[in-house]
């Protein structure tokens, strides 16, 4: 397990990076610092393998800090994380391993950690075991990865993939054989569909077995049952983290942010299965509730940049979400960012007129009128 420290003068940025790093299951964040001075003092107590440094910081910037860290311990790998790309050349002049641009994506983090592991010669059997019995991702497009694999499995047929997705949605539940057939082959007659099901089950199990993903798949009393022991499944983790959003506070914000990052898109959105529509809507409602609660938390703490980032993500997924539009306008209003407020209001007004034939709500209009006075 790699040991990391994070140095960034914005706490929400630290929290997001920490979640992404620990989600790789190959990095543990042993400490974080809000200033370069604190980081240099903290290096006396901690011995990280890698330091993730923001560049734009007051007093001592990340480039200067990197040089000072390497003077203390030149075995520490340096990775820069910044919103600005003009520092790239200088970053590599201090022998940085990588240079990540905000906003971060999990794919970028995975690639960087992979490079780091190779550079330090840490790709051992113990690291490969960290992924357990494989990884399954359901948000966006269904993707299944075997143990230690960086490439998703290739399904022999689209029906084998769909059967796996259907059983995954009904994980560890008994599902009637004919219910499966009605979902996957609604147009087939009973005699033919039985053969199709058996053939598809064989192909599904063959693909997963070849990828090293072990599953329990059984048939009893006319019902099929599937379990995936020790397999990481993003929707299972999301359900666990977002089980209760009753109170978003300092002690719970980290796990709720982690849940939010898991939701990369609608449940099986890119697979477009009709039988998944109700579950997709269910997860979207959970996501909206969670995201809105986190926005409220940040706004109450006057952390408007963090709130705005999440609101923009909500609006990418739900462009006509009036609640999110109003909260974003309130952020601009409180910050006295009149240009952003007016620009967004006019875009919202046009969107609602073109798509719905209506004006924004009275409360949004009242907010707009107050800024014009």
Image (spheres, rainbow, N blue to C red):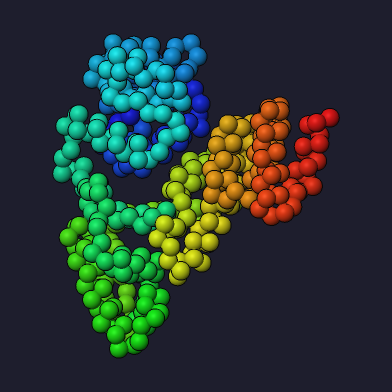
Residue 76, percent from left and from top: 27, 21
Q: Residue at x 46, y 69 (%)?
A: 274
Residue 308, percent from left and from top: 59, 36
Q: Is residue 275 above or below residue 77?
A: below
The C terminus appears in which quarter of the rendering? top right
Q: Residue at x 54, y 45 (%)?
A: 316
Residue 365 appears anywhere in the view? yes
The N terminus appears in which quarter of the rendering? top left
Q: Depth check: give the residue in front, 28 or 349.
A: 349
The answer to which quarter of the image holds residue 333 is top right
Residue 14, percent from left and from top: 45, 30
Residue 108, percent from left and from top: 35, 36
Q: Is residue 351 above or below residue 219?
A: above
Q: Depth check: give the residue in front, 232 or 330.
A: 330
Q: Residue furthest right?
A: 373
Q: Depth check: give the residue in front, 47 or 49.
A: 49
Total of numbered circles in the picture? Answer: 0
Side of 238 relative to 151 (left or right)? right
Q: Residue at x 28, y 39 (%)?
A: 26
Q: Residue furthest front?
A: 354
Residue 48 appears anywhere in the view? no
């Amino acid at each position: 397990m790699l040991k990391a420290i994070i140095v960034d003068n914005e706490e929400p940025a630290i929290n997001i990076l920490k979640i992404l790093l620990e989600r790789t299951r190959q990095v543990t964040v042993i400490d974080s610092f809000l200033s370069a001075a604190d980081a240099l003092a903290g290096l006396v107590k901690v011995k990280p393998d890698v330091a993730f440094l923001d560049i734009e910081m007051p007093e001592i910037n990340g480039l200067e800090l990197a040089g000072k860290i390497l003077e203390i311990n030149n075995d520490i790998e340096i990775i820069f994380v910044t919103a600005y790309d003009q520092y790239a050349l200088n970053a590599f002049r201090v022998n940085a391993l990588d240079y990540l641009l905000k906003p971060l994506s999990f794919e970028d983090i995975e690639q960087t950690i992979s490079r780091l592991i190779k550079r330090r010669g840490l790709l051992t059997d113990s690291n490969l075991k960290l992924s357990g019995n494989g990884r399954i991702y359901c948000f966006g497009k269904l993707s299944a990865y075997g143990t230690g694999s960086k490439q998703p499995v290739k399904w022999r047929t689209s029906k084998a993939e769909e059967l796996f997705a259907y059983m995954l949605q009904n994980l560890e539940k008994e599902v009637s054989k004919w219910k499966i057939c009605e979902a996957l082959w609604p147009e087939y007659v009973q005699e033919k569909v039985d053969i199709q099901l058996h053939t598809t089950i064989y192909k599904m199990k063959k693909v997963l077995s070849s990828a090293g993903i072990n599953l329990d798949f059984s048939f009893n009393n006319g019902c099929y049952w599937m379990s995936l022991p020790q397999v990481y499944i993003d929707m299972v983790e999301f359900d666990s983290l977002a089980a209760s959003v009753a109170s978003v506070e300092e002690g719970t914000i980290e796990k709720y942010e982690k849940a939010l990052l898991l939701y990369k898109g609608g449940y099986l959105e890119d697979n477009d299965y009709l039988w998944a529509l109700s579950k997709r809507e269910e997860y979207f409602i959970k996501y909206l509730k969670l995201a809105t609660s986190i926005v409220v938390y940040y706004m109450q703490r006057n952390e408007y940049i963090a709130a705005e980032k999440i609101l923009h993500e909500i609006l990418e997924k739900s462009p006509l979400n009036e609640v999110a539009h109003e909260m974003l306008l309130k952020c601009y209003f409180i910050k006295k960012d009149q240009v952003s407020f007016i620009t967004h209001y006019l875009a919202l007004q046009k969107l609602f007129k073109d798509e719905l034939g209506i004006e924004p709500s009275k409360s949004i209009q009242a907010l707009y009128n107050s800024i014009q006075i």
